[in-house]
């Protein structure tokens, strides 16, 4: 780890101010950034911790059929407090291990957009809205390839608004070593349609399986998928799975999510 | 009634109190006054020429005290191979020098070419990044098979080949084996890979050197399984330090599994730096360094054939293996694939012909050496996989086929076709125990229940034999060993009756501090809590070879017995003097010396006190003191054996394998502490199942380690593993060591991989698949791909 300054502001305004200097870096739960620093793969001059900002914390029932989750809310807090959206609470409760869940945050996960992370599937699969210090971003406009987002430099995720679906499930097939998603599929059924979001599988990061959504809009049953397949070309190939295997798993996990949600 | 102390008692592991309360004392816990820190510059390419190293900028960095490069160690020796192997054509094995720091070329990713010593660890690391090394990358020889192909690049230019040796075992049996296979009515063939493993001890390697300019003496604290061996290698082969000027201390060590048997260059570096600076110098590996530079395990590519009669009678095993030894010869890398592998290739069977051809191959990867099981898992895997395949081809029940070919109890001592003399065993009896544990008759119902849930269920079995306590020294020496294979113990009875037992073997998870006192307590009839074990410090213990190859109780324990026998003999003389009788009249029982036919008796503690307060000793006949040393060189290996059964479920949609039941029946001979033995089996099974399903050290074609962190190298975790059923009630004591013990540390890791693979193949077959083999690790992707191709 290289030397850096560390600040822990109490307000979003102070955090933005701290982040405005050169080579300053926001620190959420640190579950990706701290290992990166320890391996000397990043050298920020200043870390701005977001964990001391009260307004970024907690799960709120918005009273309009949606849940709001503060950007610095830990996975463990979501698992414990997002019972109004059981599939989301279940997803949060199965990220990593207890140490990860008690440090890692939803804002940190989304800003990092690891192609095998769980939260991007929930956000995209729920059509959630990401709020930052200066705008609201629809999930469909937020994720931008591997580790990429449309966040601007110095922009902070303040909260995420999840519309609560009629039924939903997240099914994750574990990568044996990291226990990230080798393939994870989030299926959510809303009054105005079904959304299917896939993480872990694609070289382009989290994506919506629109053909499956269209089929499931006609009938929300696994049989609707019988004739559908994902093309393997854009799938990830690595030590843990071929392109064909990941493409196959997308369908298997989607079916399992439909069954679990039905 | 189970015993509550002594041999056979499940005494609680006394060392766990300090480990579990954070009071262990590991190398990195030790900090000496004035200590400086070392960090290494390591190659990020697998093969390259070092054109220049400019350390001037690094030398100007804050806190930097010294910088070393390969140039500084040109005059010292290389880290040697401990076992000489001769090729089939009579030529000696190739032994390129393994320098302290790479010089001229780097040969694997992680190969250290420079080191910085600084006031702090962070300063040393900062300065390493300022070293400017011009390294011209060369094409990597990263793959074992490609390394022996025509036109392959060379790992070591000076030896003009990547083949270290081409060994035949037993070469004189080759023609007969070939002829027998040619004439056989049935031949089963199997090509397999024994996957490369990364040891991943919980505690990374660490070394701390101290130098006393006044006495010209060094102390090296280091993560070692065998401190005397490290001292010998550092002193006699590498640094030229007189042995009496170096103390090596291996304090608490957090797991070794073989990887800490060996001497590594970092140990020599910190010694040199400590002398140069007259300051203590410490280095502790980070996890990345552990992945890149600890000696890896396994990594064989094998073709095996099994020739049989049509009734299943075995005629011959013939194997051809490429064993990857990595970029340099680690200390036992030449012994592991040869005398710990080829000699076991008859398995538990009366097969008349065995021939093994093994080529050791240099590649631009980390050195490969012994890892829990060391050669024997590779042998067992090849044999027990092909026996299973053969059973299927012949339509014979896999257990029946094994039993048909077992060595029978009345055949011992039995000389196998691979040249070993098995002293004892009862393979049918152990198989009987396993069959009872595994509830074979209930399997059909369990399979039906799995199938009702859409899952495939398979049952796999194995039988294994292994060889522990590598011995004897004279035979091993004739076969090329460059070290002795004995071990040692000193039993020091103190004046107040408590005892220190100093042993040459080392405990780094095995529970020696509990088990060894149980042996002495049993022999002396005293409370085991009066006895402490001392190990890991060359200034305190007699010269021993340390812990590897499940040898500690079989060899080190035997030395303890011999030393304790000497104690009893000496104590009898003292007791005879105290009771004014002749030594021949003294009986020793339950901790007391008595005069036969009288009520005269003295307790062990009284004798101990007298030994050190010898006011009335006739000194010309009776020496004061009560301390004895013994060295024990075994007559033979010991031969643990066992039979395992595994039931798996395979999810046909995803290829995921889950282990539902695992039963292990082992013959370890006599047992000192049943609880510790069960724990050793549990740990071995976890590592074997890890190899079968999860673990894989993978290099890409450029020699980059793809599975170089826990994000990609899958270690077995608790929820990957079942509750084990283990049993060692069917046993045959070793016939040639005084405790009748065989060793248990590696068995689980040896017996379990083929058992798991056999179970998965059985499961797939039940689903209509004609898959006959899947290489380990049987990841979901691999299983699914095999099922769907």
Image (tube, coloured by chain):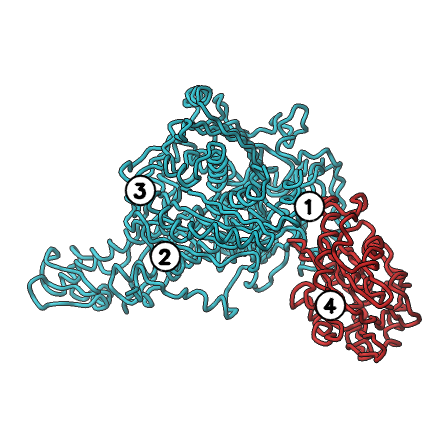
Chain colours: A red, B cyan
User: Label 3: chain?
Assistant: B
Question: What residue would you read off at disc 1?
Answer: A239
> Quick check: do tags 3 and 4 share a chain?
no
Per the image, the residue denoted by label 3 is B424
Q: Secondary structure at mark 1?
A: loop
Query: What is the CA distance from the residue labelled 3 to the residue labelled 4?
Result: 59 Å
- Nearer to us of marks 2 and 1 is 1
- Residue B753 point in image, percent of width and height: 51, 45
Q: CA distance from mark 2 to mark 1?
A: 47 Å
Q: State the SS at label 3.
A: loop
Kindly check if marks 3 and 4 are in contact, taking CB atoms under 8 A apart as contact.
Answer: no
The answer, for residue B507, to whether it is visible in the render is yes
Residue B271 shows up from this direction: no
Judging by the rendered image, the residue that carries numbered circle 2 is B502
Q: Nearer the viewer, mark 2 or mark 4?
A: 4
Which residue in the protein does label 4 denote?
Answer: A87
Please determine if labels 2 and 4 lie on a single subunit: no
User: Considering the image in quadrants, where does the C terminus of chain B appear?
Assistant: top right
Marks 1 and 3 share the same chain: no
Label 4 CA crowd tier, 10 Å (few <14, some 14–19, many 20+)? many
């Amino acid at each position: 780890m290289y030397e850096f300054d560390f600040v822990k502001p109490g307000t979003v305004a102070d955090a933005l101010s701290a982040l405005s200097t050169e080579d300053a870096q926001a620190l959420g739960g640190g579950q990706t950034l701290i290992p990166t620093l320890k391996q000397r793969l990043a050298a920020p001059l200043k870390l701005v911790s977001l964990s001391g900002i009260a307004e970024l914390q907690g799960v709120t029932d918005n009273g309009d059929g949606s849940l709001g989750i503060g950007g610095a809310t830990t996975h463990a807090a979501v698992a414990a407090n997002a019972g109004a959206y059981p599939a989301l609470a279940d997803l949060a409760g199965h990220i990593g291990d207890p140490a990860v869940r008690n440090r890692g945050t939803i804002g940190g996960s989304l800003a990092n957009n690891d192609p095998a992370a769980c939260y991007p599937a929930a956000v995209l699969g729920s059509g959630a809205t990401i709020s930052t210090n200066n705008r609201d971003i629809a999930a469909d406009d937020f994720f931008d390839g591997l580790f990429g987002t449309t966040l601007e430099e110095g922009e902070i995720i303040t909260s995420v608004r999840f519309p609560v679906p009629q039924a939903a499930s997240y099914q994750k097939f574990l990568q044996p070593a990291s226990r990230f998603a080798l393939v994870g599929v989030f299926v959510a059924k809303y009054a105005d349609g079904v959304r299917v979001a896939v993480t872990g599988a694609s070289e382009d990061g989290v994506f919506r399986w629109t053909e499956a959504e269209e089929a499931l809009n006609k009938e929300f049953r696994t049989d609707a998928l019988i004739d559908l397949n994902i093309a393997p070309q854009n799938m990830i190939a690595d030590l843990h799975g071929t392109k064909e295997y990941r493409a196959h798993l997308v369908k298997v996990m989607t079916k399992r999510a439909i069954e679990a949600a039905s | 009634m189970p015993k509550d102390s002594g041999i056979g008692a499940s005494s609680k592991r006394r060392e766990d109190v300090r480990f579990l309360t954070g009071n262990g004392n590991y190398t990195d816990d030790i900090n000496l006054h004035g200590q400086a820190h070392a960090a290494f510059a390591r190659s990020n390419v697998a093969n390259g020429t070092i054109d220049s190293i400019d350390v001037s900028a690094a030398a100007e960095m804050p806190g930097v005290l010294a910088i070393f490069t390969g140039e500084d160690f040109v005059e010292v020796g290389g880290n040697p191979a401990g076992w000489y192997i001769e090729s089939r054509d009579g030529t000696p094995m190739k032994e390129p020098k393994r320098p302290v720091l790479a010089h001229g070329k780097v040969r694997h990713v992680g190969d250290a070419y420079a080191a910085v010593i600084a006031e702090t660890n962070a300063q040393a690391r900062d300065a390493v990044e300022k070293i400017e090394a011009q390294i011209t990358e060369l094409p990597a020889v990263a793959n074992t098979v490609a390394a022996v192909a025509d036109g392959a690049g060379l790992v070591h230019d000076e030896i003009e080949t990547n083949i270290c040796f081409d060994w035949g075992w037993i070469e004189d049996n080759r023609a007969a084996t070939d002829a027998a296979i040619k004439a056989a009515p049935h031949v089963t063939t199997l090509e397999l890979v024994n996957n490369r493993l990364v040891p991943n001890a919980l505690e990374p390697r660490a070394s701390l050197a101290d130098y006393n300019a006044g006495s010209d003496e060094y102390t090296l604290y280091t993560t070692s399984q065998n401190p005397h061996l490290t001292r010998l290698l550092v002193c006699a082969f590498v640094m030229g330090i007189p042995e009496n000027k170096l103390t090596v201390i291996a304090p608490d060590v957090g797991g070794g599994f073989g990887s800490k048997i060996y001497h590594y260059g970092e140990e020599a570096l910190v010694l040199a730096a400590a002398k140069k600076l007259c300051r203590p110098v410490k280095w502790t590996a980070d996890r990345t360094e552990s992945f890149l530079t600890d000696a890896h395990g396994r990594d064989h590519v094998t073709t095996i054939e099994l020739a049989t009669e049509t009734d299943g009678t075995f005629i011959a095993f013939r194997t051809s293996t490429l064993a990857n030894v990595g970029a340099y010869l680690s200390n036992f890398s030449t012994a592991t694939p040869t005398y710990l592998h080829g000699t076991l290739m008859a398995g538990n069977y009366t097969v008349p012909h065995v021939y093994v051809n093994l080529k050791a191959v240099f590649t631009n990867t980390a050195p490969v050496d012994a890892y829990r099981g060391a050669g024997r898992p590779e042998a067992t895997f090849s044999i027990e996989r092909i026996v299973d395949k053969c059973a299927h081809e012949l339509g014979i029940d896999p257990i029946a086929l094994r039993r048909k070919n077992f060595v029978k109890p009345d055949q011992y001592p039995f000389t196998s076709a691979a040249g070993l003399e098995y002293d004892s065993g009862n393979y049918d009896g152990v198989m009987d125990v396993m069959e009872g544990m595994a509830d074979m008759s209930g399997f059909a119902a369990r399979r039906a229940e799995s199938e009702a849930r859409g899952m495939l269920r398979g049952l796999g079995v194995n039988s294994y034999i292994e060889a522990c306590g590598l011995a004897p020294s004279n035979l091993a020496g004739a076969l090329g060993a460059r070290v002795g294979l004995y071990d040692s113990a000193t039993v020091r009875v103190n004046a107040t009756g408590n005892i220190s037992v100093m042993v040459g073997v080392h405990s780094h998870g095995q529970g020696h501090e509990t088990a060894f006192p149980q042996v002495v307590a049993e022999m002396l009839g005293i409370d085991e809590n009066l006895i402490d074990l001392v190990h890991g410090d060359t200034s305190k213990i007699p010269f021993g070879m340390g812990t590897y190859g499940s040898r500690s109780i079989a060899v080190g324990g035997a030395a303890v017995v011999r030393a304790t026998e000497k104690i009893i003999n000496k104590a009898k003389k003292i007791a005879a003097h105290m009771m004014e009788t002749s030594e021949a009249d003294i009986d020793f029982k339950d901790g007391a010396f008595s005069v036969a036919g009288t009520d005269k008796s003295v307790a062990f503690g009284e004798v101990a006190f007298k030994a050190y307060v010898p006011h009335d000793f006739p000194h010309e006949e009776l020496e004061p003191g009560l301390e004895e040393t013994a060295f024990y060189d075994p007559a033979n290996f010991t031969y643990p054996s066992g039979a395992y059964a595994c039931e798996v479920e395979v999810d046909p949609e995803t290829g995921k394998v889950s282990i539902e039941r695992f039963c292990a029946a082992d013959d370890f001979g006599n047992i000192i502490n049943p609880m510790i033995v069960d724990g050793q089996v549990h740990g071995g099974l976890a590592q074997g199942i890890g190899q079968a399903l999860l673990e894989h050290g993978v290099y890409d074609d450029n020699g980059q380690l793809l599975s170089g962190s826990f994000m990609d190298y899958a270690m077995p975790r608790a929820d990957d593993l079942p509750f084990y059923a283990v049993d060692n009630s069917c046993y045959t004591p070793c016939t040639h060591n005084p405790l009748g013990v065989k060793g248990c540390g590696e068995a689980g890791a040896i017996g379990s991989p083929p058992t798991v693979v056999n179970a998965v193949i059985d499961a797939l077959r039940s689903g209509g698949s004609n898959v006959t083999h899947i290489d380990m690790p049987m990841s979901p992707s691999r299983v699914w791909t095999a099922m769907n191709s």
